[in-house]
Amino acid sequence: MIAKADRFSTKKNLPNFLIKFVQDKLKNIVPPLIAIAVIMVVWQILCPPGSKGLPGPLQVIGETWNPYIINPFFDNGGTDKGLGLQIFASLQRVAIGFSLAALAGIGLGILIGTNKVIYRALDPIFQVLRTIPPLAWLPISLAAFQQSNPSAIFVIFITSIWPILINTTVGVQQIPQDYRNVARVLRLSRQKYFLKILLPSAVPYIFTGLKIGIGLSWLAIVAAEMLVGGVGIGFFIWDAYNNSLLSQIILALLYVGVVGLLLDRMVSFIASKVVAEEQK
Amino acid sequence: MSVFVEIDHVDRIFSLPNGGSYVALKNIELKIKQGEFVSLIGHSGCGKSTLLNIVAGLDQASHGGVILEGRQVTSPGPDRMVVFQNYSLLPWLTVYENIALAVDEVMGRSPASDRRSIIQHHIDLVGLRHAASKRPGELSGGMRQRVAIARALAIRPKLLLLDEPFGALDALTRGGLQEQLMKICEESHVTCIMVTHDVDEALLLSDRIVMLTNGPESHIGQILQVPIPRPRNRMEVVKHPNYYSMRNEIIYFLNQQKRDKKRKATQKVANVNAKAIEAPLSNNAPLVRSEAAPQQLEKVTLEIGFIPLTDCAPLVVAKAKGFFKKHGLEVNLCRETSWSAIAQGIATKRLDAAQMVAGMPLGMTIGMGGNQPLPIVTSLVLSRNGNAITLSKRFYQQGVRTLADFKNAIAQTPDRVYNLGVVHPHSMHNLILRYWLASGGIDPDRDVNLIVIPPPHMVAHLRAGKIDGYCVGEPWNSFAVSEDIGFVIATDLDIWPGNPDKVLGVSEDWVNQYPQTHIALLKALIEACEYCDDPRNREEILQLLCQPQYLGSAQVYARPGFIDPYNRGTQEQPQILPRFNQFYVDNSNCPGRVEGLWILTQLARWGITPFPKNWIEILERVRRVDLFGEAARQLGLPDRESDREPFKLFDGMVFNPDDPMGYLKCLEIRHEIRVEEIIIDAAKADVA
């Protein structure tokens, strides 16, 4: 690292900020790359080609290269689609379920947070419901909706609503006394208090809830699709398992992880733009 | 000069989770004029911010309230804008938007351009034009506080309330902001109440500094006027001749409070240790649950001393009419021969409690006549008035009718020294007599001779010619009148109507050891006092009093003043003096601190004791208004002290409780006044 810096700094025609930029990026990128390389090597050693059990990385890449890696959007009809399309289908379900959960969660959260009576009425119920594992809802939702798609979306909804709801409630309840005093002294109307003080003050909490919610939704969809079927990454994994195509499973898992990370980062990014500096 | 804001006898009581209650503020009474700047100073935890919140309307007083321009304050509003200690700026709005929030809300009806210009003007006023579009997170502490001040001023409040506004800032920023605040207050004539810890800040900014005592039951200890002329400059104000003396006074006050706090803390620990073996009882009165439920009394049989005078009536009534029994006490009333015997009885613990003359608790606590200081506590004034100054009939025959005549009579016989009898150096009789003489230009120690004689012997001495007059309680004046050996030249009512005369005194140790018994005793006596002041009962009481174990005198001598019209032994018609013996009406029973301070000044005036520099501490310790309040509350009676206002006696000289030293200096006839700091160690509680 230092050697490289020296080499770069001797070249006088490269501007300083470019040097710094490259230096910073390299600082963050190189160690993980090295770690990944090491893991691959170890994995390859532990799972040599031809062995029973898990395939090594070379085998995985070899078996899934065509078509899964190079053509993620192939469509051969039915559920035989490229990983890109499978993930897209899953994401669609997540989008609908999560949006519904966000709306309901934030709305209910504000209601419960501001109204003590309703809080006392509903909170015990919610505390019980939220501990039910998402997949346990599946039989009930299947029986209710009779179709696989709505019931998967319901499972997403019921999984991700709890963190959003509870965090919003807490955020609304935790408005610092200082802000409340300001509102009281200025005699702000209820509406103004809502829009100008309550909501902005609760926004960090809401976004925490959303971040947790999106992670849980993605977890839930994979599991739900395994049971429900149809186009989706979860079903792809389940199908591959039934056909003993381990390499495809491993690849799919990798894709699932990366997409989950991207979703989380996306919510964080939006939060960073909305939440004021002092509140973090 | 009408009152702009009045804090009207505000109490604030918090309920504790275990069912008890904590009295944070007690009887706060303050009147503030328009445009005045008042600072509240006190130790942490004394309730300054609570009081400010009550004035703002963010909190409700438990009793009393706040009146602003004639209307009661019940809820917060922009006319009482608060600058909070934590600034309370909304972090997601810029500086401009924060101020705009307030301005738009309050001045919503004005056109937008007007509002904009107001906001801009105030941003410029605090010097933040360059930061108008920044968020609070990007500003320093001083800048944030400036925004808070700009926000408060932009809406033109009638009353500006500042809660330690500059507490978290460094000295330079603070100085700059103080000057800006002063300038703004002068320009806009806004009334301000500020809570602060900083003594110099208070002196720089305020017109008056109100000093609060420690909690619980925090009340106004002292009010200081700051006469430094405006406009004030931070650097110049320290050069004012009074600056440092005022500063020292405030710091001294705070030190006294600190000592008081420490003493109470050690006392509480001692009490807890002492009571660890006994049944669970509560300690200091303010934390007791205020109910009528009888608590367990530590001691039931009590010895209470008294002197046979008409105003021992409450004690006699309490025993004879069963008030003591009602509150669970078995009392033995011990007839004592003199006030010194009573003092000795309390000191040697022969007596549990006693009727004392008004100055005795203070005198004994300070340590009179070279004695060891012994803290005595009084929580009840048993009687007021009831005394008179009697002179030998000879004077009457010489034509002496008034004080001026008496002075002439003395001046005419420069060789003869007249002797006047008083009951005890610390008694109100002594102080009132001396005051009366001094206001007529007679020096009580040079022009006449005052000697101490027990009350029952006064008449005999007068008859024998050993004394030429005395000041004593009834019935000894009427006795002399009816025997035609003396005449009454002045009664209490002519000098200071409503003066405290006899109080209930117990040693501080005793109160700490038997708090519940003490409260029961107070309750019994308050009820007895109420009984005594009912005119329908006076005949009955007289019968009781004249029994041999009490007064032992014939009824006819005790009747005047108490029931019958008062005969002064002059040619004038006897008049009914309804307040001659006052036991209960007009909040008689409360041992007010302002009276106590007057007694201290008079004791110092005549060199009987030094004047305590820490008079606040001593008064708090000796005159226990909180215990009286506790007993009164349990009986369902009003429990507050009278207002601490200046009052004057018959000669018109005004006594201002905020400036006792000034009062002393104004008195013409006096001894050399010693001012000492009198530290009395907390008496160690006996561990049973």
Image (cartoon, coloured by chain):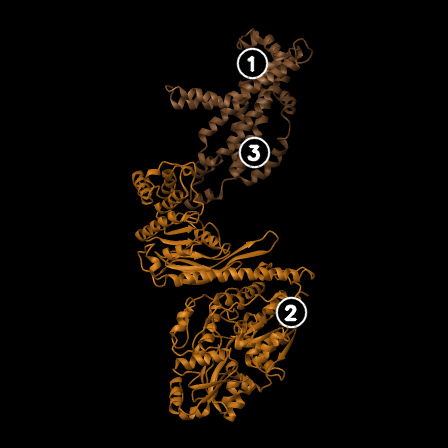
In the foreground, B496 or B251: B251
Instruction: Write down the colour of chain B.
Output: orange
Disc 2/disc 1 C-alpha distance (Å): 90 Å
Residue B316: tell me if it is visible. no
Do the numbered discs 2 and 1 sit on residues whose CB atoms are within 8 Å? no
Look at the image and tell me in which quarter the N terminus of chain B lies. bottom left
Do the numbered discs 3 and 1 sit on residues whose CB atoms are within 8 Å? no
Q: Are marks 2 and 3 on the same chain?
A: no
Q: Residues within 10 Å of mark 1 (few under 14, many from 20)?
A: many
Task: Identify residue type, mark 3.
Answer: Ile
Task: Identify residue type, mark 1.
Answer: Gln
Numbered label attached to residue A166: 3
Q: Residues within 10 Å of mark 3 (few under 14, many from 20)?
A: many
Disc 3/disc 1 C-alpha distance (Å): 32 Å
> Pointer 2: what residue?
B326
> Pointer 1: what residue?
A86
Asked if A169 appears above or below B478 in the picture, the reply is above
SS category of the residue bearing label 2: helix
| Displayed quadrant of residue B239 | bottom left
Instruction: Write down the colour of chain A.
Output: brown
Q: Position of residue B321 (x, y in %)?
A: 62, 74
Q: Chain of mark 3?
A: A
Asked if A113 appears above or below A133 in the picture, the reply is below
